[in-house]
Image (tube, rainbow, N blue to C red):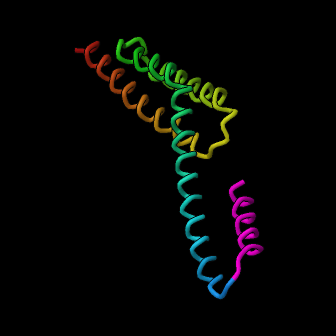
Amino acid sequence: MLKTLKLESFGLFKTKAVGNEIGDFESKLKLEINKLTLTAKSNCSARCDQRCQELIKSEVETMESMIRQELIREVEDLNERLSKLRERYFEITAEINYTGKPFIIGSVIDRLTHKGYEAIMRNQREKYN
């Protein structure tokens, strides 16, 4: 879509432009369109990040609560729950066409894995001490 808008902008400019300094104006137009394109892409990425995180928020909070309460006591249980969380994430974000989705869930899984393993190890130490 952005590519189409760029092409249409340049086409319109070339049909309406007059004078000797068309090249200078075209360069300025390219720079301005590139700035706007980068801003639009950045804003879109930020919104997609936020939306993906919102959609999985309650599931993540539930996992964090279970970890804090030490309801997950085995590594296998933690890994299974994290796997289900990943699947659930991709189900509920299926409608969002965004290449950053794997990175979002990856960072969430990493954080929960770290917290979960710490809690399991702490529980194991207390159990054997």
Q: Whole-percent x and y of residue 91?
A: 67, 27
Observer-nearest of 89 and 121: 89
Q: Within the image, what quadrant is residue 32 found in?
A: bottom right
Q: Whole-percent x and y of residue 18?
A: 70, 81
Q: Within the image, what quadrant is residue 110 found in?
A: top left
Residue sticking out furthest to the bottom: 20
Q: Residue at x 68, y 32 (%)?
A: 94
| Image vertical order of residue 10 relative to residue 3, above or below | below
Observer-nearest of 16 and 30: 16
Q: Main secondary structure of the magenta part?
A: helix
Quadrant for the C terminus in the image: top left
Q: Residue at x 38, y 31 (%)?
A: 114
Q: Which residues are magenta?
A: 1-18
Q: Residue at x 53, y 35 (%)?
A: 105
Query: In the visual, does 99 lie left or right of 106?
Result: right
Is residue 95 one of those drawn in magenta? Answer: no
Q: Whole-percent x and y of residue 79?
A: 51, 26
